[in-house]
Image (cartoon, rainbow, N blue to C red):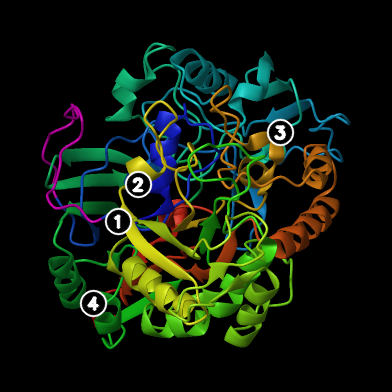
Amino acid sequence: MQPMFQKLLTLSIALLILTAGCSLTPPAEPEATPTPTSLPPLARVVDILPEAIFIPIPIDPPSFNAYINDTGYEELIGELVFGALAEIGPDGQYYPELAAEIPTPENGGLSKDGLTVIWHLRPGIFWSDGDAFTVEDVVFTWESLRQSGIYAPGFDLIEAIDAPDELTAIIHYKEFYPNYRLQFGGEGTGVFPAHQCGQLDRMLLWDCNFEPVSAGPFVLAEWEPGERLVFNRNPAYWVPERPLAQQLVFVIEADKDRREKMLKRGSAHLDLWTEDPQLSRLEEEENIFLFATNPARFVLRLVPNLSAFGNADATQPNPYLADLRVRQAIRHAIDVPRIIEEVFNNRAIPTDTELARNGCSVSPYTYNPETAKVLLEQAGWIDQDEDGTRECHGCRNAVEGTPLEFDSYYYAEFGNSLAKAHKKIEVMLYDVGINIHPQPVEGVDLWGTWTDNGIEIRGNFNMDLWDDGYYGIDPTDYLYDLYDPHAIPTQNDPLAGLNVMRYRNPALGDIFDELRAPISDAKRNQILCQLAIILYRDLPATPLLSLPDYYAANNRLQGVSPHIYDTVTWNAADWFLLPPENQ
């Protein structure tokens, strides 16, 4: 499965990385093994220890810097060396890492207006080269992103960072940033070493992108492009008696069948983002254990264009999909459990709201073709000539006699399963008189910029099928970009947001005003669930199913705990191998 991150990568580069993002799902399988954009300076050969943990990956990571790349692999290795002020654990709760505590109103770390956040850093942390970790590194990270023109969520809202002492960072915002707790954290991102990386305005060219000093549990010992990356235990790591493993080895192996064989025979210990048919074969192996992330993160949904094809004008209704009854009919016509069984091998979860993992619940849509037909009749779409496709006879937005027939896009990089799912949706919709024609397009075309004639941003589509999901536990920025009426891109403001559906509900403006204020987590979640109900009723997008990430591990490997809030190496310091006789 091609990750939604490939979509977000395309958007982030092309739109100056407008959207919040960074998700981790399986990166695309390469046809060949590329090397980094510039060869890392570290190429010395080190001894591989008998107790080393082996993780095969299909490509070299582009760098260690997840702020400038987004393939998933830089996050894996960046997590080993760049610490974060705070992170999110498997339980969905924030925890401090390089910070001594999470700033809150109760401990004085968050001002009443939400515009000032005070971080107190842990004392006694050192980089692997012996330099102390201080507030200078925090300021450097913000300044380098700003001066290099690299967008990262929320950093553009920072006006200044005061450093009254070496262990205190006082961050001043021009407006409240709801996800401030992950400001210097997240999947593979965190705080950079000010003394080692390079010039503030030259982030793309930093030495530490390829050979960083470490504040994490491991240090890079060898990088042989196209062959392997070797990480040794960081003796300066600040957590007592960690890491448990002495060495991690990432082996570059593009062939997924070879990666499967390596895992079966024990020459590899962890397979990342495992998919069928490998997944089905591996679950039959006695020495292999499978992990599925729960909750699932990425939601497969149909995305309708509510404006007329090709004009990107939200005031000009789409002749087919602007009528809510048609969108409701489409949802009732789709047998989601059947798609899950026949396409995704029962490894997906029916989903009616992408806010389900925030505890928000809605009444599930039921598969009911007869209900779909009634809705279409009520909307004025009737098959008078009995050719199987309904025509407009008194419908709201189309010319009389227009057939209910249009193309629907899906992104080719996802793989064959998305094509199969879309084909089944085509058949199900045709059964109720809607004639869609699935068309594959490249993600770079589907999510391109206005200047590059991006299909969605220009409104050159009627409907799409793709997956997406939000990082962390606060989806405020993600939801704003997708659904707020102010986030509709136009020719005059192509960076307004990603509301390419041209969905306009004025009530959402007030809701997002509330969500962008410093309120309690309980109140925030209550408002999010109100939003979930509105989106469920309006169907600006139609969630269908959620896709967990799968991982396969040799039974000797202990301590691995994959979850959706961070990359799998988030707790690599706790990994270790059982002796062979105990597997």
Give the distance between the C-alpha atoms of the residues marked 1 and 2, in whole angstroms.
7 Å
Report the magenta residues as a range: 29-47
- Height in image: 512 above or below 440? above
Tell me which label, 2 or 3, sits earlier in the chain: 3
Residue 31 lies in the magenta stretch = yes
Q: Looking at the picture, how far across and down is residue 375, in whole percent?
A: 67, 75
Tell me which label, 3 or 1, sits earlier in the chain: 3
Direction from residue 230 to residue 462 in the image, left or right: right
Element under disc 4: helix
Q: Nearer the viewer, mark 2 or mark 3?
A: 2
Q: Looking at the picture, how far across and down is residue 136, in whole percent?
A: 55, 17
- Disc 3 marks a residue whose amino acid type is Tyr
CB under 8 Å between callouts 4 and 1? no
Residue 522 lies in the magenta stretch = no
Give the distance between the C-alpha atoms of the residues marked 4 and 2, in whole angstroms.
44 Å
Q: Residue at x 16, y 29 (%)?
A: 39
Disc 3 marks which residue? 177
Q: Looking at the picture, how far across and down is residue 210, in whole percent?
A: 27, 30
- Height in image: 475 above or below 323? above
CB under 8 Å between callouts 4 and 3? no
Q: Which quarter shows the N terminus?
A: bottom left
Disc 4 marks which residue? 580
Magenta span: chief secondary structure: loop
Q: Nearer the viewer, residue 378 or 314?
A: 378
Disc 2 marks which residue? 443
Q: Is residue 167 visible?
A: no
Tell me which label, 1 or 2, sits earlier in the chain: 1
Disc 1 marks which residue? 412
Tell me which label, 4 or 3, sits earlier in the chain: 3
Q: Nearer the viewer, mark 3 or mark 1?
A: 1
Q: Nearer the viewer, residue 216 or 66?
A: 66
